[in-house]
Image: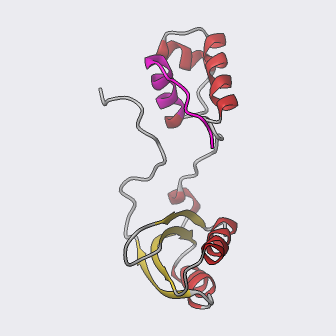
Amino acid sequence: MPRPISLDDIDRHLLDLVQDDAGRSLYELGDEVGLSPSAVQRRLTRYRTSGLLARQIAVLDPRVLGETMTSVVLVALDRESESLHTAFRDEMLAEPRVQQCYGIVGQWDYVIVHVTAGLRESRALSQRLFLDHPNVRRYETLPALESIKVGLTLPLRAPD
């Protein structure tokens, strides 16, 4: 398990900026937080080395790609065991159209968010992942009408 690192106000500001747009130059980031580019680079290296900055990704705009459909799926497993949960989680991790998967408490075991090219692909994916799954008791798919807010940004500073 990674150990937490201590962060000062500059760290939090810098991390907020990087979470918003990791493609900013060291010069731009330095201007925003009041540090030289080399000092920004040292901090970014510390974040990577500590595991805090796990990876940098490119975020695509689905509107530019054409038709995409986001769905939230609630899943209840039939039988409970550590190995059955591990197997289900591994299947979700292996499916590229599954963007998020959360183990939850209550009448459902998992909440899954997946993105497909449309209703036909969503149905086929649900058939394969849930309907034909030997340990899924029931599932409910909730297609999203629109994306209001999408993100993975962790809050680090109080809003200005």
Decide whether residue 4 is among the magenta residues: yes
Q: Residue furthest front?
A: 81
Q: Is residue 80 above or below residue 5?
A: below
Residue 61: x percent and y percent? Answer: 53, 53
Quarter of the image with the C terminus is: top left
Drawn side of residue 33 relative to residue 43, left or right: left
Q: What's the residue at 47%, 30% (across, down)? A: 16
- The one of 23 and 42 positioned closer to us in this rendering: 42
Q: Can residue 68 be seen from the camera position used here?
A: no
Give the side of residue 127 with respect to residue 63, left or right.
right
Dividing the image into 4 quarters, which one contains the N terminus? top right
Q: Quadrant of residue 13?
A: top left
Q: Which residue corresponds to the image point at 59% horizontal and 77% vertical from the top-left?
A: 81
Instruction: Determine which quarter of the picture holds residue 47.
Output: top right
- For image coordinates 44% across by 67% down, the residue present is 104
Above-or-below relation of 22 to 97: above
Residue positioned most to the left? 160
Q: Is residue 92 above or below residue 154?
A: below
In the image shown, does 4 or 102 lie closer to the viewer? 4
Segment tinted magenta in the rendering: 1-18
x then y, percent, for residue 133? 62, 87
Instruction: Provide residue 83's location: percent of width, then percent of height.
Output: 66, 75
* Residue 62 lies in the magenta-colored region: no
Q: Residue at x 51, y 24 (%)?
A: 6
Asked if residue 128 shows in the view, the reply is yes
